[in-house]
Amino acid sequence: MLKAKIVEIGPEAISADDPLLILFDETASSQLRHVSVVQRFISPNEQHFSLKTGGQIKIDEQVYEVAYVGFLVADNMEMIGHATLFFEEVPEQPQHNGIYLKPYQIPKLHVGSIISYE
């Protein structure tokens, strides 16, 4: 299991019109930080990203079932802490950097929220 703490939420990171969250680690540029949720991994050297379809993501006490994990997600998460969380049905052509989650509702987030990738 990999855990991360949210350290910054960009002013345009959450939109009522787009059911998604863009995650990056603290290496993100200022332009990316504007539209992203910045996460800091807790004990990153002791943990590896191994999320699979059927797994779970917990954001604080909110639990989501993983419906799909794109093939670029694991490498992107380990290199730059990047993935896009989609709170919608998996489309015919899903995003390669996307994690599709159920239920289809964006979580309530705040600086200090904990994301657990299980």
Image: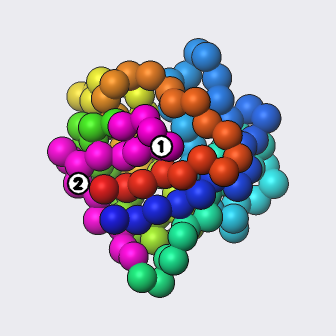
Within 10 Å of the Cα at label 1, are there few (<14), some (14-19), or many (20+) other Cα atoms?
many
Q: In this view, does 25 lie to the left or right of 31?
A: left
Kind of residue sitting beneath label 1: Ile
Q: Pointer 2: what residue?
A: 52
Give the main secondary structure of the magenta stretch: loop
Distance CA(mark 1)–CA(mark 2): 17 Å
Which residue is farthest bottom?
45
Q: In this view, does 21 lie to the left or right of 98?
A: right
Boundaries of the magenta span: 47-63
Q: Is residue 77 above or below residue 9?
A: below
Q: Nearer the viewer, residue 45 or 29?
A: 45
Q: Which residue is drawn at 55% across and 37% down?
A: 21
Q: Where is residue 112 in the image (x, y as percent from the top left)?
A: 66, 51
Q: Is residue 68 above or below residue 91?
A: below
Which residue is farthest left?
54
Q: Is residue 27 above or below residue 108?
A: below
Q: Position of residue 67 (x, y in %)?
A: 24, 37
Which residue is farthest front?
61
Labels 1 and 2 touching (C-beta < 8 A)? no
For label 1, the SS is strand
Residue 99 in magenta? Answer: no
